[in-house]
Image (cartoon, helix red, strand yellow):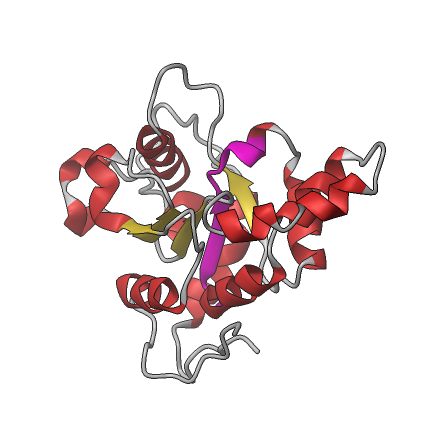
Amino acid sequence: GHVRRQVGQDDASIQAKDALMFSCTTRASVCDATCPDCPKRAKRLLKYVFLDVDGVLNSRQHLQGLVPVYADRLNPTDFEIGFNQISPELVERLNGLVEDDVVFVLSSMWRKWFKLDVMQEMLRLRGFRGVLADATPSRLAECSRGHEIASWIESETGVELSRGQRAWPAFVILDDNADMDRLMCRLVQTDYDTGLQDEHIKRARSMLGLRVDVQLRFAP
């Protein structure tokens, strides 16, 4: 199963996760996240995983194996197609990052094809034990994925990434592409041929400041 949080972990970071679902009462354009109860301050205590799907939760090998599945179906639904393209083995690996203070944000192109609750249900049915809390903006014209992620972080946490990495919240990006611009240092890059592997989970845990000396049950 997934790894439980350390005994004595700061409960403030656990409670802060609920703040992700609320908005600051101050206009975002002027909010500096200094008011004591501002959700943006609470969000800075959390750890974030920005999640791609293709090449992370599936692989070339997995997708090639779906050809016989579709050969017997005349009109598969979009949900069925998406569901089948997600590998349960790779989702089980992703569960190695599920912790009380870790928030998952969908950064994949899939966010443009499926609503967030539909994506959550697909992943749940494939064995995901976490929650997709949000998705990165999808209306930014002619920009990289790194820019979209940066825009989400600045909007949701109030942190100006230009101030330097010391001010950044803890986050990692799971993606098989490298169009991350200034966020390259937070990329855990997978391979489309194989998808998410044990080494990626271990590296991501280390980058998030999570324990890595624990026994994780990964997919075979």
Residue found 56% across the figure and 60% down from its top: 91
Q: Position of residue 125 (x, y in %)?
A: 72, 57
Tell me which corner region of the image, top left, top right, bottom left or bottom right, holds residue 180. Answer: top left
Is 87 positioned to the left or the right of 81 in the image?
Answer: left
Q: Position of residue 5 (x, y in %)?
A: 45, 77
The tally of labels here is: 0
Q: Position of residue 172 (x, y in %)?
A: 33, 52
Give yes or no for residue 12 being in the magenta stretch: no
Give yes or no for residue 106 being in the magenta stretch: yes
* Span highlighted in magenta in the image: 99-111
Is 17 positioned to the left or the right of 13 in the image?
Answer: right
Quarter of the image that includes the N terminus: bottom right
Residue found 41% across the figure and 27% down from its top: 28
Is 27 positioned to the left or the right of 32 in the image?
Answer: right
Residue found 44% across the figure and 30% down from its top: 26
Name above or below for residue 93 compared with residue 62. Answer: below
Tell me which corner region of the image, top left, top right, bottom left or bottom right, holds residue 184. Answer: top left
Taking the image as drawn, is residue 38 in sight? no
Name above or below for residue 14 compared with residue 8. Answer: above
Name above or below for residue 145 compared with residue 1. Answer: above
Name above or below for residue 76 compared with residue 1. Answer: above
Taking the image as drawn, is residue 49 in sight? yes
Residue found 67% across the figure and 59% down from its top: 126
